[in-house]
Amino acid sequence: MLDTRGNDAGMDAWADCDLAGEFERQLDDLLAELNSDWVEPELPPRFASNEPFRRYHRRNGMRWQLACILRERPDLAATLADRVLAAVVCDEDVAANRQLIEPMLMTVGRRSVQEYLISVVTSGSLRQRVCAVRAWYWSQATLVYESPEALTSRKPTTVSQAEDDEVADLRAWYRAACLTAFVECDHNATREWLARGFILDESFYPPNLHRRVARARAIAEADPVRFKGLLSKTTDGTNLAAIRPGDDR
């Protein structure tokens, strides 16, 4: 597994792209081991001279190539799972990160992926914790409803409910991990992301965490504009829903 212990000195000014170099290095290493034939495409001169854009374009290409290989070769995906997940928690792209997460869900299963993300929220560097929260969104099971009426009455399809039930216990672990990390962290930009993973409602937690919930509430109430969403949240926000015609009843 990835050594998630990081030195976050000077994190007051961290921003996206702080992990870009490490993410690119991991993609390079994985593609080299897979003997990939990926070659960095040439860009028009006006873009090629822009180094940040060129590197961004390069990472996107490598991520896509690696994802294609992992989807086509689940045996390799299983062998490299730890290293791919280590790359996932260095991927700061909130949308494109799903390209590597989805092959892992299919290969090692949702539980293994989510357990890894929880471990990073618990003990990773601040930057990695943010990436883990961003990745969690795509790791979740989706409750599928056949109609708006089914959604209103909270009657998902049987198959999607079973998939959600399989990892229901991990949602509690994830909430607790985000809550604890939020309280222990003194960096507000990181706290804003961690706040997406838990709720300020004691009924969601065992009694030994109630004092921690109170501490998190005090932190949020001291900065109500920044943490408006956390203070007003009425659901824990750790699962997804979709309405579509069901064929999996």
Image (tube, rainbow, N blue to C red):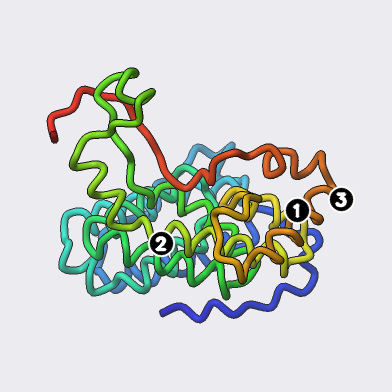
Q: In which quarter of the image is residue 47?
A: top right
Q: Residue at x 39, y 61 (%)?
A: 169
Q: Residue at x 78, y 50 (%)?
A: 220
- Residue bearing mark 1: 217
- Residue bearing mark 2: 170
Number of labels in the image equals: 3
Distance between the Cα atoms at labels 1 and 2?
23 Å
Estimate how packed mark 1 is, as few (under 14), some (14 to 19) or many (20 or more) residues with alpha carbons within 10 Å. some
Asked if disc 3 and disc 2 are in contact, CB closer than 8 Å, the reply is no
Which element type, helix, strand or loop, lies under badge 3? loop
Between discs 1 and 2, the one toward the N terminus:
2
The amino acid beneath tag 3 is: Ala
Q: Quadrant of the C terminus?
A: top left
- Residue bearing mark 3: 222
Residue 171 position, x and y percent, is 44, 57
Asked if disc 1 and disc 2 are in contact, CB closer than 8 Å, the reply is no
Residue 138 position, x and y percent, is 40, 47
Q: In which quarter of the image is the N terminus?
A: bottom left
Q: Which residue is drawn at 33% across and 41% down?
A: 142
Q: Is residue 122 left or right of residue 244?
A: right
Distance between the Cα atoms at labels 3 and 2?
30 Å
